[in-house]
Amino acid sequence: MPTHELVTMQGILRRSLKLFTEQPSLVNNCYREYDDQYAKSGAKIGDTLKIRMPNRFTVRTGRVAAPQTITEETQALTMATQKGIDIEITSKDLTLSMDDFEERVIKSMIATLAADVEADMWNIHKDVYNHAGTPGSAINSLTPIMNAQKLLNKNLVPATPRYLVFNSEANVTLVPGLQALFNPTGQITKQFVGGQMTPACGFEKVMTSEYVPTHTSGTRDNTTPVINGANQQGATLVLDGLDASVTVEDGAKFTINNVYAVNPMTKATYKHLQPFTVTAAAAADGSGNITLSISPSIIASGAKQNVNSVPADDATITFTPTTASTGYPVNLGYFRDAIALVTADLDKRETGECHVERYQNLSMRIWTASDIREDTRITRLDILYGYKLIRPEAACLIFGE
């Protein structure tokens, strides 16, 4: 745009959207969609979007046909989050060039808003059941990264695009830890000059984020919980063997003895135990019994089979991390389309000046009204969005210290 262009509300909105899409965050490295069903009337808080999931089938052997019913499966994504930043613009501000206003105001405003949305999106870590690395141990080798890559491969996740997101602590220990390895000279130079991990081990983009969350384990003790009752399948699991009234946190990861993962297509048994995550916090009763809501559901047969067998009665449970009431950062390796971010148009108001714009599948609204006594405009910039981990098998946490 020309440098002499003066500040306008629509100009602010367009610059804001462009800057938002340039932020190095989960926001711009995920499956991002604009939902046009709200384009005419505007979206309302609580509206939902249905995301269609891929069908799965079993393969027949032999001449006789075995028709399967096509059942379309969807996931609901609730767009219930509205965030925004409100500023006061004076008549003097409006005489600035747009470039000056962008440097002084818009860049800081959008960086703050994008950071807040990213921090919100990191809540998906509770829904990720694959995990690698050792809680409390520094990430100073490629081993946890390769293990994360292995789990994505085992789940038949597409090879590209895959991304890694580390906190600064992991970046500090990982870059020096790889110096002795044989690497392309250009990659070593980039790491040395930039102090940042470069693409490696099949992950084509490596990012550092200060919004990587810390997962804190519940008060669960060091006793060994076990399966309470044989032949349990589905999204709930009953355990016993805990101390009375201990808690298991939302997002706790665990495996079950002798319950192995299977190839999603052939159903052949893998060598690693199927990982699970707890989807709702729970507390044991006075006898140490507890009922957990879990993901994925335990399915031992059919097209959606994900384990080689149902858990046996008294099969042991192993939580990760094993230590109670302790926090560990959860870095992330994932296939881009594992995480979905959807925006929709907010209502275009008739009072004041209001604009709604869309850019690269993101929608924002700017709305301003004047105060003639103070010679100012109160201006609000809003985004309405929803996010979800729509392909849990395509993401893997990497624990660190």
Image: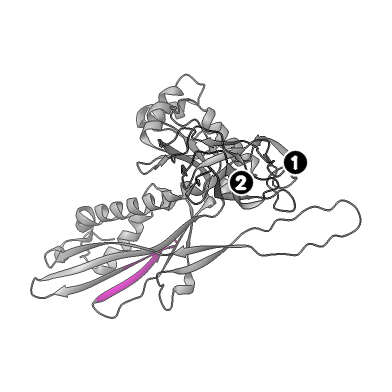
Disc ID at residue 158: 2
- The residue located at (38%, 26%) in the rendering is 192
Compared across the picture, whether 202 is left or right of 43 comes to: right
Q: Which residues are magenta?
A: 353-365
Residue 206, visible in the rendered structure: no
Q: How far across and how far down the image is residue 206, in percent?
A: 45, 38
Q: Quadrant of the N terminus?
A: bottom left
Magenta region, main secondary structure: strand
Looking at the image, the residue that sits furthest to the front is 286
Q: In the image, what residue type sits under mark 2?
A: Pro
Number of numbered discs on residues = 2
Looking at the image, the residue that sits furthest to the top is 180
Residue 154 occupies quadrant: top right
Looking at the image, the residue that sits furthest to the left is 373
- Which of the marked residues, 2 or 1, is nearer the chain's N terminus? 2
Q: In the image, what residue type sits under mark 1?
A: Ala
